Image (cartoon, rainbow, N blue to C red):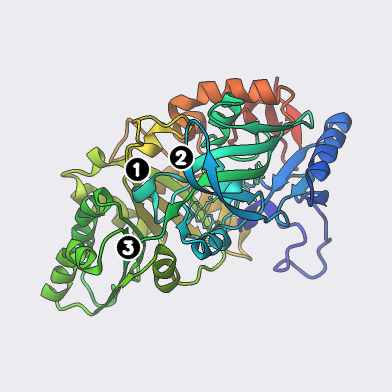
Amino acid sequence: MAPYWANRSCDPFGARDEACVKGTYLQYAVQVESVSDITRTVQFAGSRNLRLVIRNTGHDYFGKSTGAGAIGLWMHKMNGFDAIDFNSSYYNGKAVRVAAGALSADTTAKAHQHGLAIVGGNCPSVGLAGGYTQGGGLGPLTSRYGLAADQVLEWNVVTVNGTLVKATPEQNTQLYWALSGGGGGTFGVVVSMTVKAYPEERTASANLTFSSAGVPAQTFFDILETFHSCLPTLSKAGGTAIYNIQQTGFALIPATLPGQGKDSLDSMLDPVITKLKSFNITYVYASIEANTYFDAYEKMNPPSETSYFQIGGRVLPQHALNDNYGQLMQSLKDILDYGAGIGGLSYHVPESGDGRFNNSVNPRLRSGALSLTIGTVWDDINWTLDIANQELMTEVLIPAVDRLDPTQRTSYLNEADFREQQWQEVFYGESYRKLLHVKQMYDFQNLLWGRTAVGSETWLERNDGKLCRSF
Ligand SMILES: Cc1cc2nc3c(=O)[nH]c(=O)nc-3n(C[C@H](O)[C@H](O)[C@H](O)COP(=O)(O)OP(=O)(O)OC[C@H]3O[C@@H](n4cnc5c(N)ncnc54)[C@H](O)[C@@H]3O)c2cc1C
């Protein structure tokens, strides 16, 4: 998913006579089929001073699911699923238990067969119990039920000393707190996870596309400004909008409004349609009201291709957008002018029942309103251009967004610039200090390492990708 981290080792786009080396890839991987596969691998790696990497789907944009010289735990084949009634002092109700390798869309489909919905990603192929939920987890149901990490009732985890433990709000509470939002691949090896599930309900969904061909830039951004000013109403009503902006046009794919009808969604997006009509611009708008969230997701989410972008991202709070949409448009324009693309996800995390979330999600992600992802297209042949695009991301494109909220730079730790200098503050916010404490409690030798993961300061990465102790 993130070709840069393969460092052109055995690159099919390279010259035919280039040596095929493992390079930055894992040296060996254990195809995990049982808990004992994990405990034995963890103990083996620990006793031999081997770098240990947990790999699920390989979606990670930071190269955290591979590593030079490492032995990998490949979780993909562990894909069990159970719909259960969960009874505890902190939650009584429907729940879903998934094994570590379960994919978001597969779990959504299986839950649907039980009349249930779960908080999955927009992307069907992210690993539900892996980096997605452990890193926070944004998706079409975020404004309705909260972040994916907010849904977790319990984790089953193998710690680096090879012990299987349960982490819940009542048991191993610090580990539970850290795993729910503090990022994947660093606190222990998750074997399975149990999350809240909700009764399926009618869901409205809409797609909108229009091209920028022949449209003056001012008009294009005028329409986009109207679109963005509709989003707070949608988010507050429990909806999300997921969209892409390119130099060539705009695609809303899709807006989702669970629990409400098509008329409500149509009226929330009506100002954009009215504006398109007033400028006589051709557009395609389709909206539906499905009986279930699953049906809406299936019908309105176009197939997702593998990622071929180098990305960076920022999360903006609503107060940075209020009365400031003109500045947002200027920032988006500056980014598009460099040929980069922009992805947006608008959301509003609802308050929990008791007003508190006992997890480590960056509080500024929780209070965010818009997650922007910027992508430069990966070039398979031109490595120099790819490196130049990384610098462009850090030095030009991300700062263009920072003009909106210079004092509180925040990124969603799963969708951010891997070159971020102040990643502890920007990715984890005020949770970082306590997260580091939990890391030291559960992995004081720092056997598990990932770039920008909690505790990763203890190792330095050499040019060949191998690690040296930094202190
Ligand atoms: C195409 C694409 C679309 C995406 N769409 C969304 C989206 O809609 N919403 C969203 O919130 N994010 C999205 N993301 C970001 C995604 O959530 C992260 O990349 C996430 O880290 C993926 O987790 P994974 O387990 O699938 O991937 P992996 O790359 O396999 O793992 C990611 C991290 O989690 C760790 N990890 C994996 N399994 C375990 C385990 N069992 N125990 C402990 N640690 C583990 C790994 O070591 C690594 O550090 C998307 C990414 C891509 C590439």
Q: Which residue type carries mark 1?
A: Val
SS at mark 2? helix
* Quadrant, the C terminus: top right
Q: Residues within 10 Å of mark 3 (few under 14, many from 20)?
A: many
Residue for badge 3 = 255
Residue 83 falls in which quadrant of the image?
bottom right
Q: Which residue type carries mark 2?
A: Asp
The reply to whether the C-beta atoms of the residues labelled 2 and 1 are less than 8 Å apart is yes
Q: Nearer the viewer, residue 415 or 73?
A: 73
> Spatial distance from mark 2 to mark 3, Cα to Cα?
22 Å
SS at mark 1? loop
Residue for badge 1 = 349
Where residue 107 sits: x, y (%)? 56, 59
* Furthest-left residue in this view: 278
Residue for badge 2 = 150
> Spatial distance from mark 2 to mark 1, Cα to Cα?
10 Å
Name above or below for residue 81 compared with residue 281. above
Name above or below for residue 434 compared with residue 221. above
Mark 1 within 8 Å of ligand 1, using the beta carbon:
no
Q: Residues within 10 Å of mark 2 (few under 14, many from 20)?
A: many
Q: Nearer the viewer, residue 29 or 84?
A: 84
Where residue 31 sits: x, y (%)? 80, 53
Q: Which residue type carries mark 3?
A: Ala
Where residue 72 sits: x, y (%)? 77, 46
In the image, 149: left or right of 403?
A: right
Residue shown at 65%/34% (left/top)? 186
Residue 172 falls in which quadrant of the image?
top right
Q: Nearer the viewer, residue 67 or 258?
A: 258
Where residue 204 sits: x, y (%)? 30, 66
* Quadrant, the N terminus: bottom right
Name above or below for residue 315 compared with residue 122. above
Q: Report whether residue 70 is seen.
A: no
